[in-house]
Image (cartoon, rainbow, N blue to C red):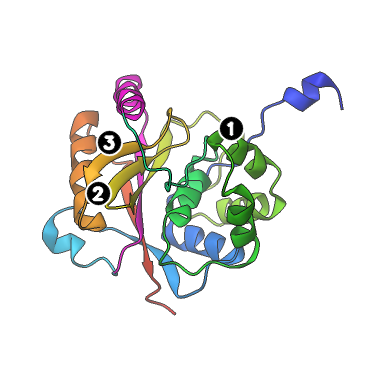
Amino acid sequence: MSATEALKKIYWVPLESSPEAMTKMIHRIGVDKAFAFSDVLGLDPELLAMTPQPVHALIFLFPVTDSFQATRHSEAEASSPSANVWYSKQTIGNACGSMAILHALGNAPGVKIGGELAEFFAKTKDLSPLERSKALETCKAIAEAHGASAAEGQTAAPAADAKVDLHYAAFVRVDGHLYELDGGIPGPIDLGESTDLLTDAAAVIQRRIAALNNGSPLLSVLALGPNQDN
C-alpha cells in the first residue's frame, strides 16, 4: 500500500435517522433484543412521557451550521468531563450516526451488550479518543452492520463520500452529569448535574433547536430504551 492510499480517508454511507434501522444495527453487533431505539414524539412533558422508559441515551439529528458548531466547540473546550465517559473522536467520514450510537451504548451500563460490540468496548476501554477512532476504522463487524442498516433506510442512501449537512450527537448521563457527545468536536460537553436523562437532555435539545433558529424540518430525536416489540 502506498503512502497516499494509507492516508486516504475512510467514508461510510450516511445512516438515516430511523429507529428501525438503528435498532437492527445494534442487534447485529451484540445488543440484547430487549433494547431498541424509538422516536421521541416531542420535547414537551406530555409527549416525553410517551417515550418507552427507562431511557438510557438520546440521539439528536440536526442541520450543521458554522455558528452552531463553533458554540459547541467552545463548550467542549471549556468542559472537564469525568474519566468514566466513553468518548471517541470521529475520523470516518459520514459515520456520525454510528458514532452517536457507540457513544450512547458506551455510556449505558443498563443496556446488555455482548458479541462484537462487547469485544470492541473491552478493546478500547483504556484507549484515547483518537485511538478509539482508529480502532473503529478497522472494526469489520461494526462497519458491516452500519452498511447494512444504511441500506435499509426509508430513503435512498447517498454516496459514502457525499457532503451531508446533517449531524448526530448523543446525550448520556455519567456520574450524575449530563453529557453531549460528538466525535467532531474537541471532547465531551459537560452539561452539568442531572437527575433525569430524558427531561434534562430534552431541555438542552430545545435550547439547541432555538439556537439553530432556521425552522428546519430535518430535526429528530431518538431514545435508547426498552424494545416495545420484543
Instruction: Say which residue label 1 marks.
Output: 91
Residue drawn at 47 percent across, 42 percent down: 87
Residue drawn at 63 percent across, 35 percent down: 11
Image quadrant holding the C terminus, namely bottom left
Q: Would you place residue 56 above or below residue 125 in this image?
A: below
The answer to whether residue 12 shows anywhere in this view is no
Which of the two marks, 1 or 3, is nearer to us in this view?
1
Secondary structure under badge 3? Answer: loop
Give the amino acid type for the residue marked by disc 1 in the picture: Thr
Residue farthest toward the right in the current orientation of the protein: 1
Give the amino acid type for the residue marked by disc 3 in the picture: Ser
Residue drawn at 42 percent across, 29 percent down: 185
Residue 67: % across, % down: 30, 20
Give the amino acid type for the residue marked by disc 2 in the picture: Ala
Report the span colored magenta: 54-78
In the image, 4 versus 165, the foreground residue is 4
In the image, 205 versus 121, the foreground residue is 121
Residue 150: % across, % down: 56, 51
Residue farthest toward the bottom in the current orientation of the protein: 230
Q: Is residue 69 magenta?
A: yes
Q: Which mark, by number, is residue 201? A: 2
Question: Are discs 1 and 3 less than 8 Å apart at CB?
Answer: no
Q: Would you place residue 163 above or below residue 124 in this image?
A: above
Instruction: Say which residue label 3 marks.
Output: 216
In the image, 20 versus 85, the foreground residue is 85
